[in-house]
Image (tube, rainbow, N blue to C red):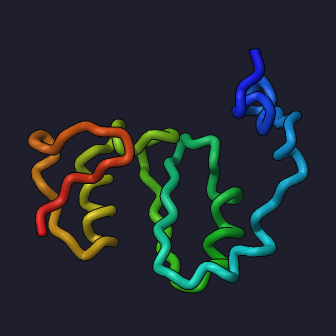
């Protein structure tokens, strides 16, 4: 059954065959003018050589690589993830064991 994911990406995450096959955002990265946080993990499919062009092209950027994570440092190194994101946002982190586990959510105290 057709889906937006299969149309854009194709059936595999590792070999793109859909409409995004030739799409490349890198030439437009210099237009990003807001502070940006790039995250990856040591065992991530987004290895340093994948992240580096983004780091070099975005003006106000910070990059943090998690030492023991793959693509999910918010689960694999939760305490450190909370500290890094809270620090970037200028907040103090809530104790990671008391923080809710929600997709895309970072629990911080103001």
Q: Residue at x 23, y 49 (%)?
A: 79
Q: Nearer the viewer, residue 21 or 51?
A: 21
Q: How many marks?
A: 0
**Depicted 99 relative to depicted 64: above or below:** above
Tell me what residue is drawn at x 87 percent, y 44 percent: 21
Question: Taking 64 as reference, is 99 left or right?
Answer: left
Give the residue drawn at x 52%, y 77%: 61
Q: Position of residue 28 (x, y in %)?
A: 75, 74
- Front-most of 29 and 48? 29
Towards the viewer: 82 or 52:
82
| Residue 26 occupies quadrant | bottom right
Relative horizontal placement of residue 40, taking residue 6 as reference (left or right): left
Where is residue 69? Give x, y as percent: 44, 42
Could you say where residue 93 lies in the image, as x and y percent from the top left? 17, 60
Query: Which residue ends up furthest to the top in the rendered image?
Result: 1
* 2 up-or-down from 76: above or below: above
- Residue 27 position, x and y percent, is 80, 73
Figure check: 86 above or below 22: below
Q: Quadrant of the N terminus?
A: top right
Q: Going 69% across and 82% down the picture, which residue do you hit?
A: 30
In the rendered view of the protein, which quadrant contains the C terminus?
Answer: bottom left
Which residue is nearer to you in this view: 17 or 68? 17
């Amino acid at each position: 059954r057709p889906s937006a994911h299969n149309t854009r990406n194709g059936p595999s995450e590792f070999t793109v065959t859909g409409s995004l096959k030739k799409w490349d955002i890198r030439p437009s990265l210099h237009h990003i003018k807001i502070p940006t946080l790039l995250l990856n993990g040591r065992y991530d499919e987004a290895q340093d050589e994948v992240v580096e062009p983004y780091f070099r092209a975005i003006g106000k950027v910070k990059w943090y690589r998690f030492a023991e994570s793959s693509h999910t440092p918010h689960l694999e190194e939760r305490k450190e993830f909370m500290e890094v994101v809270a620090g970037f946002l200028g907040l103090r982190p809530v104790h990671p064991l008391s923080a809710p586990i929600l997709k895309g959510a970072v629990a911080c105290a103001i």
